[in-house]
Amino acid sequence: MPQEYRLILKHADQAGYTPDMECYLRHGGYEALRKALATAPRELPDGKKQSSQEVIRDEVLKSGLRGRGGAGFSCGLKWSFVDRRSGKPIYLICNADESEPGTFKDRQILHKDPHQLIEGMIISCWANDVKLAYIYVRGEFPQAARIINQALKEARSKGFLGKNILGSGVDLEIHLHRGAGAYICGEETGLIESLEGKRPYPRIKPPYFPAVLGLYMCPTIVNNVETLCAVRHIVSMGAAEYAKLGTANNTGTRIISLSGDVQRPGYYEVEVGKATLGELIHHENFGRGLRPGRSIRAIIPGGSSSKVLKAGERFKLKRKGADGQMTTVEVDLLDLPYDFDSLQAAGTMSGSGAIIVLDDTRNPVDVLANVSEFYAHESCGQCTPCREGALWMSKALHRLTHGEGRKSDADYLLHIAQNIQGRTICAFGEAAAWPTLSFVKKFKAEFEARGAADEAGTGPTGSGKPPASH
Amino acid sequence: MSFSIPAPLEAELDELVTRYPQKRSASLMFLHTLQEHFGYVSPEAVEWTAAKLGLAPINVFELVTFYPMFRQEPLGRTHIKVCRTLSCSLAGAADLRKKFCEKLGLDPKAHVPQTTTDGNFTVEFVECLAACGSAPVVLVNDTLWEKVDGTGTDAILSEGKRSETRARSAGMAG
Ligand SMILES: Cc1cc2nc3c(=O)[nH]c(=O)nc-3n(C[C@H](O)[C@H](O)[C@H](O)COP(=O)(O)O)c2cc1C
Ligand code: SF4
Ligand code: FES
């Protein structure tokens, strides 16, 4: 039976669990940090020696942990790219911008268990020789900012932060930094610019890979809140135990944000890949299905930037049989295991772990109009294809939802989207293009019918049917 | 109104500067702190920040114009931010914003932030507030209201009115 597996959110919702230091310590808090600091250097079978820090970095790599912020990139590999020879300081930034529409998991950690994040950060900093780190919290989390500030103060007074932390001879400081309402600050190089006190214009890669030229042009690690919390558990359980959670290449747990047309929206921490998309939506332990009499029309599986999946779609997945042979199986979208690789095989992504369900009363034209307005508003404006394209798409969708559409708008939308992706400085370009490309391709008849009806004067003029964005 | 920074506030700002290897990094936190204190970011606040951080005023002003949370004029004391993004929209965000506007005598069709003539309330649409599981949501000043329905709307408005009254009588007493 698919069920929650609460590792990171183990205590967060327990009665009487509070975000202060004393409560965290009563629940075994900062034991993982002590364990990390006490890690002995070791010699590998091939005679290579590893320092204590290298041992921890190796553990994180072996755990298979993949970033929970969106791209699902190996955390250990990311850390291995850090330029440790430059002689410059290395910085670490916790990405707590949580701004991908549909996502509300980091919020739970920041508000309910801030010390878990701080412990994960201290371990990660120590393992990477970081002396100064920041938590970049989105501006719309004023209460989280207060809670984090308080938690940092407590950590300082207990000697977990500051000079010579826990007598280790190592100094470490972590500060809170607040964003101010711009989605693009979630993109790691935009975030870095913002932390430098500038407009959050993303930097071009190459050469500005944060691991080499990040904050103040120094090597920088940017990790999501949930990723850094996972580090704390990897240290406390050991990589091998952590890797037993989840499925091959998709280890550990993940907090899924479920919203839209389900009976029980909410956040659910599960072992990665142990529940299918269908189970997350329908099962008693999760979404509990749709409202009576409704059926699924489409699913946005990984935050609003991911490509939409249409009810009834089938996908080919490669599976390893008991005999070790790879076989190909065809599955319905509801039978896709909710993990990084399966969603990718289905032509989309699990992104930030945010599933938005759309039922059969929703018209894809209205939905895309809402989504595209977001991207038009949030483009930072540096690249012409993104700045203009996002706006043009939104305008075309606005007219399609206000009785002034044309049949040709469907192709027009595809044309614009195709000319954004791959032609921009940052991945926002793809994030803006993918919803349009997938919605219009998969629901072309609906888009054309809406435009044709408008041309014939029979369209639902400004139908006002939800979701209408204004 | 003349622009002056009380000493405790300046001390707070000075402490912020020490958090960063480069002063300029403190500019966003400065603007937040000044906006909290004055209610908005005035040209004087921009110039003061720039001088304090060794920047040209344009380097600070360009932040105020880029980041949606900063505002250049005072808004209502109760600031109602209705999330308009997908999950909230599916749960009726458009109607919700309309209801706020109608009850406050604002134009439901205008897309820009609007403030009541008595200066008590501002209503605007904002993008996803990362609380989509309890849609529709509204951020009222620093407080998140979840699953806001008709009752919630009324509660938000009456709480806003109560705090206006409190502020006014406190102002008169002082
Ligand atoms: C447009 C855009 C927005 C993003 N927003 C976020 C965000 O809000 N939070 C986040 O953790 N990562 C976000 N990311 C991903 C970050 O760039 C970065 O990959 C991530 O923080 C790395 O952390 P991880 O490896 O632990 O996942 C965004 C990326 C893009 C392109
Ligand atoms: S792709 Fe869009 S958001 Fe990214 S840098 Fe270019 S204009 Fe800015
Ligand atoms: S869509 Fe409204 S909080 Fe996310």
Image (cartoon, rainbow, N blue to C red):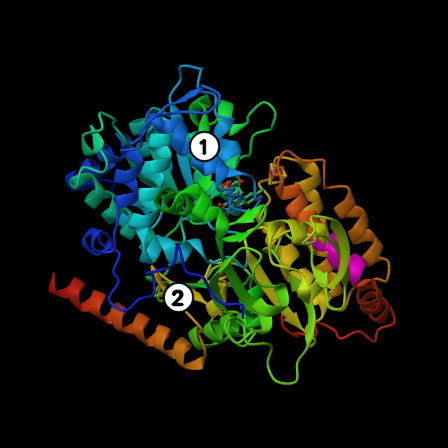
User: Can see residue A169?
Assistant: yes
- Taking the spot 52% from the left edge, 47% from the top edge, the residue there is A183
Q: Position of residue A384 (x, y in %)?
A: 69, 37
Please determine whether, in this image, residue A17 is positioned above or below residue A463.
above
- A367 lies left or right of A280: right
Residue on which disc 1 sits: A58
Residue A218 image point, x, y percent: 44, 22
Dot 2 amino acid type: Thr
Tag 2 and tag 1, C-beta contact below 8 Å = no
Residue B45 - label: none
Q: Which quadrant of the figure shows ligand 2?
A: top right
Q: Which residue is mark 2?
A: B117
- Identify the magenta region: A435-442
Residue drawn at (50%, 28%), measured in percent from left and top?
A: A80
Question: Is residue A138 rendered to the left or right of residue B169?
Answer: right
Q: In this rendering, does residue A194 appear at all?
A: no
- Percent across and percent down for residue A179 are 41, 44
Query: Quick check: is A439 in the magenta stretch?
Result: yes
Circle 1 chain: A
